[in-house]
Amino acid sequence: MPKLHLELSGTAATGTVVAYLYDLDAIGNAKLITHAPASRLHGSPGARTVDLRLPATAYDLPAGHSLTLVVDTVDPLYYDENRSGESITIGGGSYLDLPIR
């Protein structure tokens, strides 16, 4: 099961991020492999960490393709806790732990 660790900072006390893991081919076409949202409903502005498990999936990445991780704050499938004008920054200590066989 892929695990994402995000070190976030920003101006918002609450907020939502949605992580997407894509298969990206050589000409820029992307195919969604898995995704998941995470919201923080309480807290104060500043630094925080978010640990998120992406739903497990069996997927064979074709030769010549790469994995692409996208983190966004809005997805029409999920209600979000983001307020207009607030900012979120992803820090350098963030990582994706991806099991491979």
Image (tube, rainbow, N blue to C red):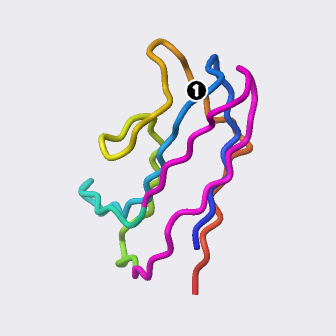
Q: Height in image: 98 above or below 75?
A: below
For residue 93, which quarter of the picture?
A: top right
For residue 9, which quarter of the picture?
A: top right
Residue 76 shown left or right of residue 55 in the figure: left
Find the residue positioned furthest to the top: 85
Residue 36 shown left or right of residue 22 in the figure: right
Q: Position of residue 68 (x, y in %)?
A: 44, 56
Q: Which residues are magenta?
A: 35-60
- What is the quadrant of the N terminus in the image? bottom right
For residue 13, which quarter of the picture?
A: top right
Find the residue positioned furthest to the bottom: 101
Magenta span includes 47: yes
Secondary structure beneath disc 1?
Answer: strand
Q: Position of residue 69 (x, y in %)?
A: 48, 53
Q: Residue drawn at (40%, 82%), measured in percent from left and top?
A: 60
Residue 69 shown left or right of residue 51 in the figure: left
Q: Residue drawn at (61%, 27%), measured in percent from left and top?
A: 14
Q: Position of residue 16 (x, y in %)?
A: 52, 36
Q: Residue drawn at (71%, 20%), measured in percent from left and top?
A: 45
Amino acid of disc 1: Ile
Q: Position of residue 33 (x, y in %)?
A: 38, 67
Magenta span includes 71: no
Q: Height in image: 90 above or below 71?
A: above
What residue is disc 1 on? 88
Number of marks in picture: 1
Residue 47 shown left or right of residue 83 in the figure: right
Q: Residue drawn at (44%, 82%), measured in percent from left and top?
A: 58
- What is the quadrant of the C terminus in the image? bottom right
